[in-house]
Amino acid sequence: MNGQTSHQQPKDGRHDDDTALTEFLASLMDYTPTIPDELVEHYLAKSGFQCPDTRLTRLVAVATQKFIADVATDALQQCKARPAVIKDKRDKQQKEKRLILTMEDLSKALREYGVNVKHQEYFADTPTAGLDPASRDE
Amino acid sequence: MSDGGEAEGTRDEQNGSNLRSGDGDYSRAISRVAMAQICEGVGFEGFNESALDSLVDIAIRYVCELGKTTRFYANSAGRTGCNIFDVVQGLEDLGKPLGFTGASEVHTDCVVSSGAIREIKEYVDMADEVPFAQPVPQFPVIRERRMIPSFLQMGETPAFKHVPQWLPAFPDAHTYVRTPVWNERLSDPRTDKIELARQHRKAERSLLNLQQRLVCNGSSVATTSAEPCNGGNGSGVNNNGNLSLEKPLEAEDIGVSRVSIPPKLSSQAQTEKQVSLLETFAPAIEAMKDGLDSGSDGEKTFPEKRDSVFLELKGGKKVFGEPLDLKIRKAVGRTSSWFGHEGEKDDKKRRVEFILRQSLENQQELPQL
């Protein structure tokens, strides 16, 4: 493992931590992330990350995947929470709505993560168009 | 996943996404697929193009940011190579806005107990494994560059003293100096001349054969031999009332002595311009044939020839149905003019060629009638 010798701690605790870490990384290798390793390696190399160990690459890939999954889940909640009901006459079913990732839901979800992706309104058809969404919701 | 209904204009989004592609189209395309797969795993059934592009941007930025932070922590510790602790610290940094359990504690000795790692662990345990849809090759692909060999490698010594041997060699002289190229061929003037003469004779012979065949095909005389022009008799001349071609007469029928005619008619022969097809060719064909075959003894074969009969054709209008108007003198004159030149084959051939040329010109006018 890398960087194990820098600290002087009781060896027993360290040993447990080491084994835990090793186990964790081993479990990480079992899991194949959706984001391919080559892509992650490419972007990490661009930003200066230098490590020949593929486990770290996998760790970064999994972390990114988790992050995106969280964002997507929040956006899904937003999509489901919207009260709009589309009555499909052909199917004769109510509340049948296709879950589509829209910019609106995404921006709402990302705001919690500190990412501001406010999309500009195309045309102002309501008095509240273009205003801050927080005030608009109220 | 399917592309859902567009809430925003697609054209603007696509133009915007084109401008945003600073990372490279290939990696972005792969990211798009990966993000779409993640969304599908979360539960979405469709997406907007713009939304997916934003998500891709965010994911790429997350990876880059994580890499940057990791590198920063490694450099802070005096290293250039990153390790697991740097990564975990970077993760904690990125997770701080949202917060994770144990953020207030610093875990530098046991990484696994860190909140960020714990979350990742939970995610790994919980989430379904969705591998990437397609195999991705290693990129970016570094192309092997072929270097110009140095002087040492080429085995050459540079022409100038100030040029060291380890520098790339100069290009070959033929790449920048234009040298004329000659066709190296041994030319023997004598063989060339002989070859030329042979080809001339060959051409003339084939041309005469062609004309002869035309003559023979056109004639309606009873003779059907291979050389109808040679056969036949003088009485056949008057039979061709409708044809344009005349049968050549026997020398005896005409009763012309070859010896007496030459001086008088040779001059006339030169002035004759309009000749018919048959009459011109018969003597020429014979002369050429015999001349070619036998070689130099043209005079011996002449008695076997018949003097051709000429039609005097009026200017501009060729009348073929005039078998009665026979003018013998021209053909005889021409034939006899050949008799005088024994050893001058070239002269004879020149005249034959002249005749042929004339007849060819007239032949072109024949179809008009």
Image: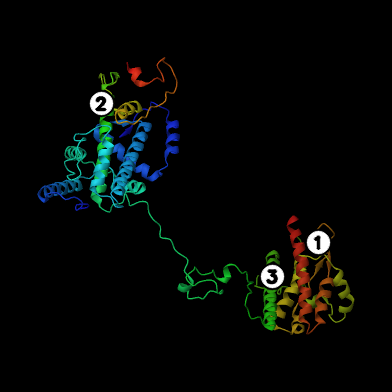
Q: Is residue A17 above or below residue B236?
A: above
Taking the image as drawn, is residue B221 in sight?
no
Is the residue under label 1 in contact with that under label 2 (CB below 8 Å)?
no
| Disc 2 to disc 1, C-alpha distance | 113 Å
Can you say which quadrant of the picture contains the C terminus of chain B?
Answer: bottom right
User: So how many labels did they put on this image?
Assistant: 3
Name the residue that disc number 1 marks: B322
Q: Amino acid at mark 1?
A: Glu
Q: Give the quarter of the image for residue B195.
A: bottom right
Name the residue that disc number 2 marks: A77
Q: Is residue B140 above or below residue A110?
A: below
Q: Give the quarter of the image for residue B279.
A: bottom right
Q: Earlier in the sequence, mark 1 or mark 3?
A: 3
| Left or right of A83 on screen, residue B223 | right
Q: Secondary structure at mark 3?
A: helix
Q: Amino acid at mark 3?
A: Leu
Question: Percent x, y for residue B14?
Answer: 43, 34
Q: Residues within 10 Å of mark 1 (few under 14, many from 20)?
A: some
Q: Residue at x 21, y 38 (%)?
A: B116
Q: Residue at x 83, y 62 (%)?
A: B313
Q: Nearer the viewer, mark 2 or mark 3?
A: 2
Give the chain of mark 1: B
Q: Amino acid at mark 2?
A: Gln
Q: Secondary structure at mark 2?
A: helix
Name the residue that disc number 3 marks: B207
Q: Nearer the viewer, mark 2 or mark 1?
A: 2
